[in-house]
Amino acid sequence: AGPTERFSCLTPRDCAREAFARFYQRAWEAELLPLRHPWITDVQDHLFGLALKLRSENDGWGPKGHEHTLERVQLAEWLRVAAEYIPTEDVPGERRCLEWDSAQYSRHYFKDHCSKMDVIAYDGDEVKMAEGQTGSRRYVVDVHEAEKIIPANSVGVVVCSQIFEHLRRPHIAMAQLFRFVALGGYVVWSAPMFSEVHGAPEDYFRYTPMGAKVLAEDAGFHIVGQYAPGGLRELAGYLVGITAPYWKKEDLLLDSGSTWPLQIYMLLYKPPV
């Protein structure tokens, strides 16, 4: 006997709800839930074959092996929208893109915008810069102290994806973005509102739409656009492992104004003085 058995139902709708509530609890007890981790499909998963197919069809729109994750599908859409919005001829300065850890998104979405693809990486207290034959740079620095090595007003487009949940002092980090983005430059930004705690190396924050907005505005950015797709249905499914292949793409990408978005995406602009 369980506590849910004390609740009776009088209508077919109520009985269906009670049946679902009891099935949900029993499914956890029987280890049928979660169906899978929202980010991981292993070889025992019946979707593993589909995951391999999606990986083989990935033309660089997202990281290999993440084709089934909801937030990667949503991020790809926001990057596409941002790339279409930003005029290729208006990228300021030396037409540099900058992205964390690799230049994958920059190369795929902003290859017509930027002639140099810079990368920033974190390695504790290490601070160094290397410049390749093409003029692209690799910075190793804590972004909170980016003034040590990244010149002011030097980057035309920054891709800052899933970084700010890992930053201990986000206001300082956003001020650094504003400092090194060139006048007339852009930042394509994303961070989770809901996510498993995950260290890289640490995990500090989650962001609401308004929290992300004021964080950027306080640094001086103009918010060109904000995107918060999905709702409670998609979020609840995500948390128990109902991954992207189960959903219609238009449902995953729809920004309906729900108060339950999975991720927050922004396009930021540094206005000319």
Image (spheres, helix red, strand yellow):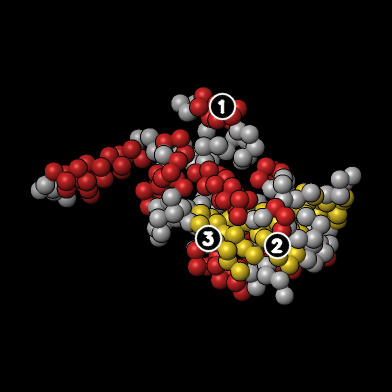
First of labels 2, 3 by sequence position: 2
Residue type for callout 3 = Gln
The residue that disc 2 covers is: 185
In this view, the mark in front (2 or 3) = 2
Q: Position of residue 51 (x, y in %)?
A: 53, 30
The residue that disc 3 covers is: 226
Q: Does 182 sit above or below residue 56? A: below
Q: Is residue 204 visible?
A: no
In the figure, residue 204 lies in which quadrant? bottom right
In this view, the mark in front (1 or 3) = 3
Residue positioned most to the front: 89
The residue that disc 1 covers is: 52
Q: CA distance from mark 1 to mark 2?
A: 37 Å
First of labels 1, 3 by sequence position: 1
- Depth check, front residue: 237 or 105: 105
In the figure, residue 27 lies in which quadrant? top left
First of labels 1, 2 by sequence position: 1
Quadrant in which the N terminus appears: top left
Q: Position of residue 46 (x, y in %)?
A: 45, 26
Q: Position of residue 17 (x, y in %)?
A: 22, 46
Determine whether, in the image, residue 105 is placed left or right of residue 50: right
